[in-house]
Amino acid sequence: MNIIELNGIDKNFQGDELKTLALSGINLTIKQGEYVSVSGPSGCGKSTLLSILGMLDTPSAGLYKLSGHDVSSLTRDQRATARCENIGFVFQSFNLISDLSVEENVILPLTYQDNYPAKIAIERAREVLAQVDMSHRLKHFPSALSGGQQQRVAIARALVNDPKLILADEPTGNLDSKNAGIVLDLFDNLHQQGRTICMVTHDPRTCERASRQIDIFDGQLVGDRITAPVAISA
């Protein structure tokens, strides 16, 4: 099953006097269970691509299907609903809310779903925190955590709504090598469980952990290679 289908995706940014073409003619299919890295030099368009995949931005031209549904022209509210139901995000800067506890940060995506029982939300949050070995920090605030711990909480938050797709933007960019390894091991485990992951990174060592490596240069897809089988969930 295809999770992502992009056909002829362009993205333009209009400045005061100059139009910048960030993406041009992107054709891309990602199957369920693939672990994909997207790499390229700064300014090549990889973060723009991730924003379109996450429906944080819309393409200037082309077709985007998520799990077979055309999401190219959804309204802002429709995109927000689709994100909540289908996508988990992991960011370089963690994006945890400082005045919420670990548990509250992880529960947060569930609060945007109508009539989600609070008791079930707590149980689900504790379940995914256990997966990332952060059960012992439920009531702590982000300021009391190391960078590696904050990123593990962010991964738990990305998992809490059981998304079809996990999007990660430089997830190890703010981490030392030890904590980066721990986070990448978590992504490896998620891949083995059959999760679909698309990760933007500039680090060649991080790219090597993915089962498929995509290269972007000047807004165009210039490389696409399979390095490992697609994971199949039990």
Image (tube, rainbow, N blue to C red):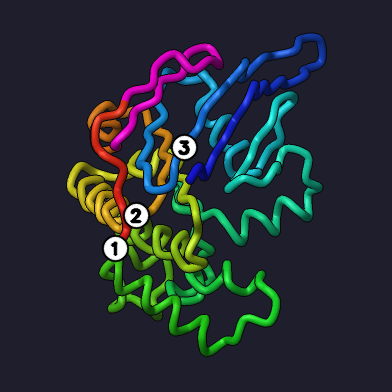
The magenta span reads 211-225
* Of residues 6 and 155, the one drawn nearer to the viewer in this rendering: 6
Residue occupying the point 71% across, 35% down: 58
Residue depicted at x 33% and y 42%: 172
Which amino acid type is shown beneath numbered disc 2?
Gly
Which mark identifies residue 234? 1
Residue 172 or residue 77, whichever sits in front: 77
Q: Horizontally, is 191 left or right of 115 in the view?
A: left
Q: Locate residue 107, reporting x and y percent.
A: 52, 74
- 82 sits to left or right of 139: right
Disc assigned to residue 194? 2
Which mark is first along the chain, 2 or 3? 3
Q: Position of residue 148 (x, y in %)?
A: 29, 55
Q: How many C-alpha atoms fall within 10 Å of the one at disc 1: few (<14), some, or many (≥20)?
A: few
In this rendering, position of residue 36 left or right of residue 72: left
- Give the spatial CA distance, label 3 vs label 2: 13 Å
Q: Amino acid at mark 1?
A: Ala
SS category of the residue bearing label 2: loop
Checking the image for residue 30, the label placed there is: 3
Instruction: Tell which tag, 3 or 1, sits nearer the viewer.
Output: 1
Dots 2, 1 in contact, CB < 8 A = yes
What residue is shown at x 53% (from left), y 31% (from top)?
A: 47
For badge 3, the amino acid type reads Ile
Depicted 166 relative to depicted 10: above or below? below
Q: Using the image as rendered, state which of residue 137 and residue 55 is in the foreground.
A: 55
Q: Position of residue 194 (x, y in %)?
A: 34, 54
Q: Which quadrant holds the C terminus?
A: bottom left
Q: Which mark is residue 44?
A: none
**Which numbered disc flags the more N-terminal residue, 3 or 1?**
3
